[in-house]
Image: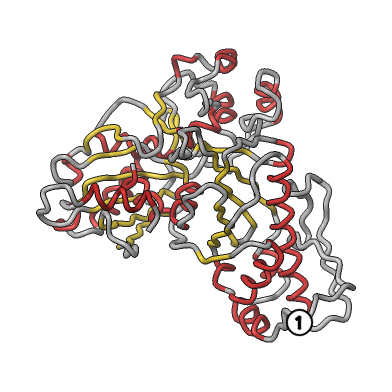
Amino acid sequence: MNETSAFVLSCSMTGSGVGRSYALGIDYGTSGVRGAVLEIGARPLKPIVRQVNLRGVDGAESWTHALRDLLDEFPPELRTGIRRVAVDGTSASVIYDGAVKMYNHAEPEEVVEKIRQVTPPGHTVASATSSLAKIVGWGATADFEHQADFVTRLLLGSQHRMSDWNNALKMGFDPEQEVWPEWLASLVPLSAFMDVKRPGEVVGNADPTWGFADGCLVVAGTTDSIAAFIASGATKLRESCTSLGSSLALKLLSDVRVDDSKFGIYSHRYFISSEDGSPLWLVGGASNVGGRTLKELGFSRADITSLSDEMDLDKPPSKDLKLYPLPPGSRGERFPINDPNLTPALDRGGSSDVEYLRALLDSIAEVERRGFSLLEAFGAPYPTVVYSAGGGAYNPTYSKLRERKLGVPVRIGDSTDACVGAALLAEFG
């Protein structure tokens, strides 16, 4: 048990001792909502997870119905034991005047250029999909909020808008100084922006109409990717998590903030500080290589499992295969290589299926190693351990290969559910 878990456990044991106390984490995605209930202080984690689909088009009505549907999935006797609640949402999904622009909505170049003219060099908001770009594209001057902000306000039964360090980052908030910077005023009046809280900070009592007991606390939330990092079990400086899904996403807990829009690298302020009280940063970058490439090359999950079992990792991969496994037919890479014209290198020559898959897995692991090395070159520490999430985390052969390539232990994360991370945030906060 780490120090944070021990602290939470000791705190949970100082109450009345009547009944069990639970934390609820709610994860809003693009098509559904997942919730996880954890007993406060109990380890190992034994989450109770439920999921509902979003009804109709994304927006206020759909998100409100989904919250009610999700809470109805938990029995009343469990819901009345919930003492703390946190929400995560998809990063840069924004609602304004009933309309929604989801995380992947891109604004035209003229909007991005307008932002770029006033932002500091390399700032993450100078992106077509940033929250700020969406607001500027709307011409909004009030009442905009992120997906997680909206749901948190629903839980509170409040009209007061607020956000958190993580969701507010792509809107321009400075999490180091904890202010909306003055340069934003040339784009949007500073008075239009919401209050911003530390993730996990108590922001009020839950509205009892949702079925919670009196005294249930709502805490400021976070983004889906940070909730997934929390769920992995990584809690200490230099610990990291790699998501091995359709693409490859790296996140590292660092005492150095790294931001470079050229490589798509940016840092979120973490909700836990270092031992001396200075901020910790969750530094991240994402490559386009990953499981999508394997799927489009015809490797099914069963194929990957069976072929992996045949691999001899003591034998080096074929030197004849020079691969960079972007998805077939795609173009462009940003991290750890910034080249919008980079094309896939996938020629298998005369190699067998085992040899080819081994070379593909080795090349994906090399991209991961180069990613961590690039973060280190920018000043972040190299990881001491890498937790893994996503489908690729459960392939033991691939994990051994990565461990040798990275030079540090590779472990399966405690959980891959963002809703579990949100529940832990509620508990820790």
Choose top left, top right, bottom left or bottom right for residue 364.
Answer: bottom right
Q: Quadrant of the N terminus?
A: bottom left
In front of the other: 392 or 291: 392
User: Residue at the front extreme?
Assistant: 276
Q: Do we see residue 101 in this rendering?
A: no
Above or below: residue 271 compared with residue 346: above
Q: How many marks are shown on the rendered structure?
A: 1
Above or below: residue 120 compared with residue 17: above
Q: Do we see residue 104 in this rendering?
A: yes
Residue 302 drawn at (x, y percent): 60, 81
Residue 13 drawn at (x, y percent): 19, 52
In front of the other: 78 or 55: 78
Query: Is residue 426 rendered to the left or right of residue 353?
Result: left
- Neighbours of disc 1 within 10 Å: few (<14), some (14-19), many (20+): some
Query: Is residue 162 rendered to the left or right of residue 154?
Result: right
Instruction: Name the residue rendered at 84%, 74% in the picture.
Output: 348
* Residue type at the position of mark 1: Asp
Choose top left, top right, bottom left or bottom right for residue 136.
Answer: top right
In front of the other: 407 or 414: 407
Instruction: Name the residue rendered at 68%, 76% in the picture.
Output: 299
Instruction: Name the residue rendered at 67%, 67% in the picture.
Output: 402
Q: Which residue corresponds to mark 1?
A: 353
Instruction: Name the residue rendered at 74%, 80% in the picture.
Output: 314
Residue 132 drawn at (x, y percent): 56, 28
Query: Is residue 60 rendered to the left or right of residue 184?
Result: left
Coloration of the structure image: secondary structure
Q: Quadrant of the C terminus?
A: top left
Above or below: residue 130 compared with residue 229: above
Residue 196 drawn at (x, y percent): 41, 27
Q: Considering the numbered disc 1 on the image, is that residue within a helix, a strand or a loop?
A: helix
Choose top left, top right, bottom left or bottom right for residue 88.
Answer: top left
